[in-house]
Image (cartoon, rainbow, N blue to C red):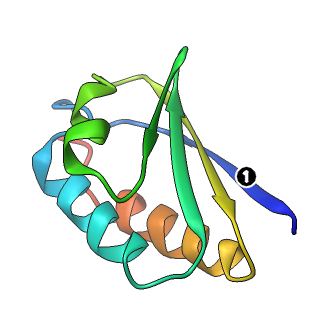
Amino acid sequence: MTIARRRFLITHSLGLHHRPIAGIVAIAQRYRSRLTIHADARSADGRSVLALLALGATAGTELVLCADGDDGEALLDAVVAHLSALPPE
């Protein structure tokens, strides 16, 4: 099995806060692949609101999104589309 990877720069002034995190978790639960999100030296399970909040990803943080599974590319497409739709504020 291959691991799909994408990078995403957070531009929202509030960083990775509860609303986008809730969307990420909802998206991740629709796929079989395992989603892991890395920020700086920390990583979090993409299906855990608390783990994602604990990343403390602020504006300007580059996220590395990794999906391990058969539908990993589709999962990352959906997560990146969700994050890209957030206004930069």
Quarter of the picture holding the N terminus:
bottom right
In the image, taking residue 4 as reference, residue 44 lies left or right, namely left
Residue 66 in the image: above or below residue 79: above
Residue visible at 56% across and 74% down? 75
Give coordinates of residue 82: x percent, y percent. Answer: 37, 67
Against 5, is 25 above or below?
Answer: below
On the rendered image, what quadrant is the C terminus found in?
top left
- Is residue 32 visible to us here? yes
Residue at figure coordinates x 17%, y 40% from the top left: 17
Q: Position of residue 30 (x, y in %)?
A: 40, 85
Q: Quadrant of residue 22?
A: bottom left
Q: Nearer the viewer, residue 52 or 81?
A: 52
**Residue 73 higher or lower than 41, as above or below:** below
Closer to us: 11 or 69? 69
| Label 1 residue SS | strand
- Residue situated furthest right in the rendering: 1
Q: Which residue is mark 1?
A: 5
Between 86 and 72, the residue placed more toward the observer is 72
Q: Amino acid at mark 1?
A: Arg
| Residue 54 image point, x, y percent | 26, 27
Q: Position of residue 46 (x, y in %)?
A: 41, 54
Seen at 50% across and 82% down, the residue is 31
Q: Is residue 12 visible?
A: no
Query: Residue lying farthest top?
Result: 41
Q: Quadrant of residue 51?
A: top left
Say left or right for 14 vs 43: left
Q: Residue at x 27, y 73 (%)?
A: 26
